[in-house]
Amino acid sequence: MSQLQEAIENITCLTPAFPQKEFDMIRQNYDKAKPLFYEALSYAYSNPEDMPKEYELHFYALLFFGEFQEKDAFEKIMEFLTLPSDMLDLLLGDFITDGLQDVLYNTYNGNLELLKDRILDSDIDEYVRDAMLNVTGQLYLDGVLAKEDLLQFLRKVIEEQDSEWEGLMCSWVAGIAYKCHLAEFLPDVRMLYEEDRIELSMYGWYDEYLDILFKYYDDDQQNRLCRSPISADQIKTWPMFEREQKPKKITKKDIEKMKKELQGSIAPSPAKKVKIGRNDPCPCGSGRKYKFCCMNKPKEETLLQESEEQRKYRLRNYPLVGAERVDGRVYLEDYYDQESIETDKLIYLAMKRYPISIFDRNASAQDINDLLKQNYLLEAFSRFKKRMEAEQIPTADAYDQKYSIHYFCREWMGELLELLEKSGDGQARDEVLKYY
């Protein structure tokens, strides 16, 4: 028996440890191994219910097709993926959601119609369709698929969802839109949120979704939907090969690393109080000297003024505005004017008020929080009203269509009305009601 035949035989069924030696032998003789991989995929497709226990050669075939970017295998793989969900789950397991999209992308042969037809086919496993959706998104990022073509197709996917998996599919479509930074798709996503067709566990509420749509990462790989190139060795650390591995001992260094990561995920602790001199710049961020600004103001009044540093912290997830532009990226300024953005920031600062600390759960802390929120919203309302009058905008809905970004008027005005009712400011409340 040749070394290649022995390697193939050794990996036909699951091995206790990762078969590195066999994988390396296959790489050296890939052209000879390729026909055997095609046979394995056909065998699994034709006999999904009668497979020997722990048969894995069809799975390794997919990995090597992806590694060697076997374009001729694409349509064979697409046929294999038409198997019923329960069969695919048995044959591929977690690989459907953790690697399949990369194999499809690296074997893609240019048959876009086949890819689209499979995505629209409700008989195909929904997680497989998600993997295919990611391929279409990556083709757009590569410049292969035009923006208008992708937008049109994503809308078609949404229109044709009527199954029990509608929420997932619509959420995945929204995911493609944000990963491809398709700001033109935001009205469609807002509609999906309005109709409760988005899984909140995926992206949070609409304001959070909008933030991540404009977010880019320094690591280019994180900006991709599909990886390329890929290696069959990527499954080396999978639990399927842990039967002969000893559990890793957790060291003191590991514990310290976990502590640092945990601390990094928690909001920074309040800065220690520093004595402010009379002639120092006022901490409220006004630019004036402390003695001419907040030094002699009542304590309650100073509490209602957030410093520039505090505002910056609350806006930390807000899309970058005024940043140095990078070619190929989209920015909020591409879609909204500066006045809209400044008004939106005020609303964002109000609506993103964070819960009162468990150490500050008293009436005064909550009152201060509400008053800060009310002040931001009143300032936003003043800007809103001025623009409505200057441009003779007929309704708040019309304003929304042109200028609203993170929140519709009914959302933040409804919040403002409740605050004004609580504070007893009937005059301001009546004014807001004219536009609500």
Image: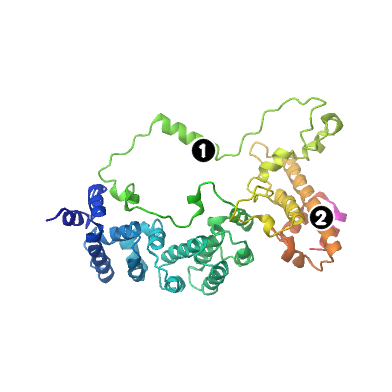
Question: Does the image show residue 402?
Answer: yes
**Could you tell whether 91 is left or right of 354 in the image?**
left
**Helix, strand or loop at mark 2:** helix
Q: How many marks?
A: 2
Q: Nearer the viewer, mark 1 or mark 2?
A: 2
Relative to residue 314, is residue 359 depicted above or below? above
First-in-chain label (1 vs 2)? 1
Relative to residue 103, is residue 320 depicted above or below? above
The image shows residue 216 at horizontal and vertical percentages of 57, 51
Q: Residue drawn 75% across and 42% down? A: 368
Could you tell me which quadrant the C terminus lies in? bottom right
Q: Is residue 428 magenta?
A: yes
Label 1 Cα crowd, 10 Å radius (few <14 / some 14-19 / many 20+) = few
**Could you tell whether 196 is left or right of 293 in the image?**
left
The image shows residue 25 at horizontal and vertical percentages of 22, 51
**Could you tell whether 394 is left or right of 172 in the image?**
right
Relative to residue 361, is residue 281 depicted above or below? above
Q: The disc labelled 1 sits on which kind of residue?
A: Leu
Residue 383 found in image quarter: bottom right
**Helix, strand or loop at mark 1:** helix
Report the residue marked by disc 2.
383
Q: Residue drawn 82% across and 30% down? A: 290
Which region is colored magenta? 424-429
Mark seen at residue 233: none
Q: The disc labelled 2 sits on which kind of residue?
A: Arg
Report the residue marked by disc 1.
262
The image shows residue 371 at horizontal and vertical percentages of 77, 45
The secondary structure that dominates the magenta segment is helix
**Contact check, label 1 and label 2, Cβ < 8 Å:** no
Label 2 Cα crowd, 10 Å radius (few <14 / some 14-19 / many 20+) = some
* CA distance for labels 1 and 2: 40 Å
Closest to the observer, 372 or 236 = 236
